[in-house]
Image (cartoon, helix red, strand yellow):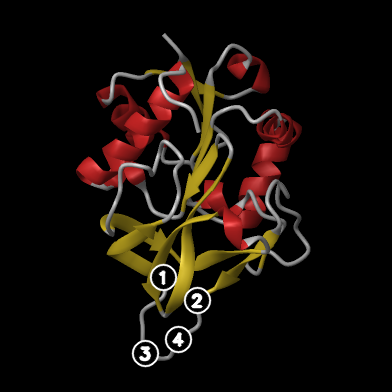
Amino acid sequence: MALIAIIDYDMGNLRNVERALNFTGADVRIVRAPSEAADAAGVVLPGVGNFHDAMKNLDRAGFVGFLRDWTAADKPFLGICLGLQMLFESSEEAPGVPGLGILKGCCRKFESSTEKVPHMGWNTVSFRSAHPCFASFKEPKWFYFVHSFYVVPDDASVTAGQTDYICGFTSAVSRGNLAATQFHPEKSQENGLAILRGFSALCKGEIKS
């Protein structure tokens, strides 16, 4: 069975992600060092919290170089929430702190005098990607969000899903075997499980991106 490694860097909602992946039948391991993910077929980077702290913890655990190499090799990768934001070069949440730089662009903060920030609760995502995580969604679907920042890719072609809240924003990305979501699949009931099933199938080689 293809192993999926969930990166533990003291910032992620690990157990919910683990339980959701287990529910889909995936073989899952929580890892705290790159060496523990050496035999994995796919990697999941969850995240909840501050961009600066997350990047510091990833670097301290040795995962920055590992993730850059992993995605450069186009191996299956799934980022969730902060795990999406860190793929980019920078964030307004932590000026001067570099992100992973795997995708070009930045993270911006929602600004509104009428709408609540953070964006919290259920909202729809309109998909436009053939990536296995998203290909089954032919119409907008509901997912659960909790975030104050959103990604702005330099390359519009990586946008896999879009959502409207204060502005229209990129809520999912894909490139090759890489996928990432601003929303939480592990909290999004059947729609979220469909994404995790697609990622598991990708890791098993049952489908191609």
Q: What residue does disc 2 label?
A: 110
Q: Are marks 4 and 2 in contact (CB under 8 Å)?
A: yes
Name the amino acid type tagged 3. Answer: Thr
Depth check, front residue: 98 or 4:
4
Depth check, front residue: 182 or 163:
163
Q: Quadrant of residue 164?
A: bottom left
Q: Is residue 61 left or right of residue 39?
A: right
Mark 2 vs 1, N-terminal side: 2
Name the amino acid type tagged 4. Answer: Ser
The spot of residue 179 in percent (x, y) is: 51, 42
Depth check, front residue: 70 or 175:
175
What residue occupies the far top of the structure in this picture? 1
Count the labels in the image.
4
Q: What residue does disc 4 label?
A: 112
Residue in view at x 75 percent, y 58 percent: 97
Distance of mark 3 from mark 2, alpha carbons? 11 Å
Q: Is residue 44 above or below residue 122?
A: above
Q: What residue does disc 3 label?
A: 114
Q: What residue does disc 1 label?
A: 118
Q: Are marks 3 and 4 in contact (CB under 8 Å)?
A: yes
Distance of mark 4 from mark 2, alpha carbons? 7 Å
Name the amino acid type tagged 2. Answer: Phe
